[in-house]
Image: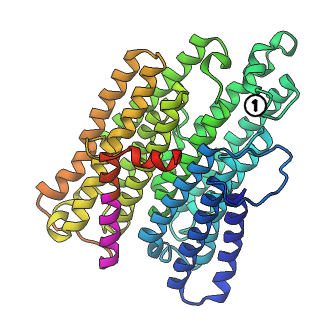
Amino acid sequence: MNAIILSALCGVVMMFSGILLKNKSSIKYVAIAALLVLLIGNLLQFYGIFTINIDSKNLLSFDRPGLFFNSILIVATLIYFILSGSDIEKVGLDVAEYFSLIFFVLCGATILTSFNGLLMFFIGIEILSIPLYILTGADKKNLKSNEASLKYFLMGAFSTGIMLMGITLVYGATGSFGLQSNMIKSAVTGFESAGILGPVGLVLLFISMCFKVSAAPFHFWAPDVYDGAPSVFTSFMATIVKAAGFFAFIRLFAAKSTDFGPGPAWTLILYVIIVLTLLIGNITAVFQQSVKRMLAYSSIAQAGFMLFALYSSNDFSKEGILLYTAAYSFATIGIFAILVKMEDYSLDGYNGLSKSHPVLAATNTVFFLSLSGIPLTAGFFAKYYMLASAIKSGGPISLVIIAVLFAAVSVYYYFKVIQAMYFKEGNAATNQPITNNFKVGLIVLAAIIIFLGIYPTSLLGFYYF
């Protein structure tokens, strides 16, 4: 409850900061301070020291995985503010409002990590989504940004309609919105009297969540939206928002696969979704000449690996999704922080970056290596946990082999950027001076990714402490 209340209050504080503070740069530091307060509040509840007690009528349920996931999201947002906060100031005049909307997104995310019923699930999704439509169209003078915002809004409204229909049908089948009554299992195994309502409702819920996390074949909105949105907000959407959506996805379908319906049918559905997501995301990314658009398709491919947590639903996958969220978010935020500084987003725009800006090239290499899953980076163990969870759950080895092959494909397009930075002649230019503070931030972030790649249990140690 601490994170939900404090994130909403921080959003309100940020709105007033725009009136009280005339200096734009000061607003970023207020946002960072507010995030630290939010992180401390969440950790106090996680360790059972202090909790804001509000009777939620059993609509919310706070457990250790959800609270720890909140901490990861808040830390990732803190890194995002530190590296990209100054770039948010350049999108438009409404700087305080942009920070405020991000805090409201975090409020929705913290609801999604603790919902205990379909009503709170829906409210969390909407609180998370609506500010994103505004942030996507923040660059009002850019037609691509306006188009992306409209497309995101229409696709979001469409998927929300599917979700509401699914919730309605599940309620009709079970007579309850709550998860505490083992809604998933009862909606499927008790259908003698409920008919077909439950299975259809669950399928609609599944489809709507595939839209939200951009899993194939419901991914088609993501590349255009990510490409059209201001780059500084794209990194937030592709990391913190996607991670929150996945945790909600897993929490909603937390029952074992055999509880969803006929075991083989549920397994087959997820098998096909994972393979399609990996195939479309990785193969399409290979042919992109824009690094930003390549990263958009890359985020779809990463969603394929994150779906393993839903496929396996065991202790290994629960630990793995925490590590994967941290590894993927940290690396992607770092990559986009550098991307925003680049004058040209194409592959050619990175030619010779190692000569003009060696620190940017070196840290960018670490981030891309982590996304590739190369050893000694956090991304390696993140992928290992996902694949190991599938093997431990007794899933088909063919799925693991396919995932490994597509991980190898991802190495190709990630390394194209590294090749451009180090092995191609050019004069990569930035659109603004690179400060020493920014370089130090990138180095620290790269060091964290390497540390998690050597000691992945250090993150999980905080969880079990």
Can residue 131 be seen by looking at this rendering? no
**Left or right for 403, reference 155:** left
Closer to the camera in the image, 82 or 268:
82
Which percent across, then down, holds residue 390? 45, 23
Give residue 452's position: percent from left, percent from top. Answer: 35, 49
Q: Which residue shows up at 26% across the image and 40% down it?
A: 411
From which residue to which does the magenta span run? 433-447
Does residue 165 show up magenta in the picture?
no
Give the amino acid at mark 1.
Gly
**Does the rendering let one see residue 391?**
yes
Quarter occupied by residue 399:
top left
Q: Is residue 442 magenta?
A: yes
**Label 1 element class:** helix
Residue 418 drawn above or below residue 87: above
Which coloring applies here? rainbow
- Which quadrant of the structure image shows residue 277? top left
Label count reads 1
Quarter in which the N terminus is drawn: bottom right
State the residue at coordinates (81%, 13%).
191
Assign the magenta stretch its main secondary structure: helix
Instruction: From this view, report whether residue 273 is shown above or below residue 452.
Output: above
Residue 362 place in picture, x, y as percent? 22, 60
Q: Residue at x 28, y 72 (%)?
A: 430
Viewer-proximal residue, 71 or 108? 71
Q: Is residue 390 above or below residue 321?
A: above
Residue found at x 53% / y 35%: 318
Look at mark 1 in the image and give the residue it sits on: 166
Residue 419 image position (x, y, % from top left):
17, 51
